[in-house]
Image (cartoon, rainbow, N blue to C red):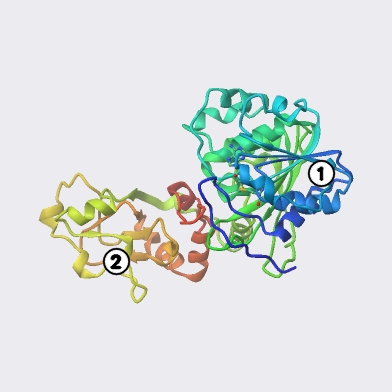
Amino acid sequence: MQLLRLPKTSDHFGRYYTAQEIAGLLIQTMSLEKPKTVIDLGVGDGALIREASLIWSDARFITVDIDKNTKHRLPLHISPSLLEHHVGDALEYALDKKLGVSFGTIDSAVCNPPYLRPKWRKHFNSILEEANLHSILPKFGCIPAEVLFIAQNLRLLKVGGKLGLIIPDGIIAGEKFATLRQALATTHRIERIIELPRRIFRNTDAKAHIMVLSKNISADETIQIQQLLPDGQLSSAILLPTEKASSRLDYSYLATNKSTRDKSDGLKLRDITLALKRGTFSSAERKTNELNILHTTDFTSDRLTVPKKFSSKRTLVKDAKFVVAQNGDILIARVGRNFNEKIWRVTSGPTIITDCILLLRVHPTYADRVFNYLTSSIGRSNLMSIAHGVGARFITTEGLLDLKI
Ligand SMILES: C[S@@+](CC[C@H](N)C(=O)[O-])C[C@H]1O[C@@H](n2cnc3c(N)ncnc32)[C@H](O)[C@@H]1O
């Protein structure tokens, strides 16, 4: 199967467009015979229902989009008697009334939600509560639209109803979403996850996954996790025990970690780290500050140590209130497209860094082993596998500490 690349990036409605083959894969992965009704909240141009209607030809489609123009772009081959489109906000509390259906009655839903942070509205609490997802609330200041769209779909579905999603990497792999993953896997059931190749959406570096959920069905013992390979085939499956659902669920992380685990003696960076800190100054502050501050843009690929020109006089940094790296420390860019290529060791004196760089100080016995590992091709690829982010990638200190060296 060749993957399509469609010509858009995210716009102000939070849209990425779903390649037709990915939509087809999502529908097949749901393994549903003949659903009566299919809901698509945030239908856009109808990429998902276009494929769904080819397989579920008798189903009735109920679609919603806030953008009034989408109506004119919906698939023409679906008979008007089977397609009911609503222009409006899918995050309204009384969505059932708007759609003319009762909550808890729909047998299937597909959704590629917008990637947005909507302004908090009081009724979002109730939406999460009625979807049995209220346990995630304390974790968030503001809830991303993807989570609210999942919750609205779950409210509409009947017990055992299926939801096929295309969701961003953050939900599958982000630490912040651990309680959501836990709730989805235990209150509901995560049937399958398929990691999609990066840049499946042209002009974006967004990484996304297919996830199929069943509403309120007792959990299976394992979650089946796969990856869509560049040649269009599915990888073999990793069967992750459901009690580990709060950990990362992205295939490339699980697969890389497993192969490293198989080879290493199980030593984690966490076990030997003496200090792991972000620099103090922002990149903007560096421009106006007289101090000599190293930033990610200063890294070059022709060396592995910090050049002398970035070191500061010891007298200048003595008793400093800001973070200063010392000889032996390892500096790692924590953000950016090629962050894993920006790893230097400090060898020529105190170095002041921006907050885009992490200072890693490990027990001296392990200093060479850690540096050699991080700058090896397996180390750099493991760093990439713990990265998060739609677009620009970043790593967290927790992710780094969990690396097995
Ligand atoms: C990521 S796009 C997905 C489009 C289409 N389903 C696809 O897969 O190509 C998300 C869609 O959600 C719509 N949207 C954004 N906020 C919305 C809201 N509050 N209610 C309904 N639709 C919304 C956008 O207009 C956009 O069409």
Left or right position of 241 against 273? right
Q: Residues within 10 Å of mark 2 (few under 14, many from 20)?
A: few
Q: Is residue 212 above or below residue 268?
A: above
Give the structural element (helix, strand or loop) at label 2: helix
Figure quadrant of residue 245: top right
Q: Quadrant of the N terminus?
A: bottom right
Front one among 299 and 112: 112
View quadrant of ligand 1: top right
Disc nearer the start of the sequence (2/1): 1
**Going 57% across and 23% down the picture, which residue do you hit?**
123
Q: Residue furthest left?
A: 315
**Going 23% across and 51% down the picture, which residue do you hit?**
285
Amino acid on which the number 1 mark rests in the picture: Pro
Figure quadrant of residue 114: top right
Q: Which residue is mark 2?
A: 298
Residue 139 drawn at (x, y percent): 51, 32
Q: Which residue is mark 1?
A: 80
Q: Nearer the viewer, mark 2 or mark 1?
A: 1
**Is the CB of mark 2 within 8 Å of ligand 1?**
no
Front one among 68 and 261: 68
Residue 11 drawn at (x, y percent): 52, 51
Q: Residues within 10 Å of mark 1 (few under 14, many from 20)?
A: few
Residue 119 drawn at (x, y percent): 48, 32
**Is the CB of mark 1 within 8 Å of ligand 1?**
no
Give the structural element (helix, strand or loop) at label 1: helix
Front one among 300 and 4: 4
Q: Is residue 57 above or below residue 3?
A: above
Left or right position of 387 against 182? left
Task: Measure how far apart labels 2 and 1 are at the Cα level.
Answer: 59 Å
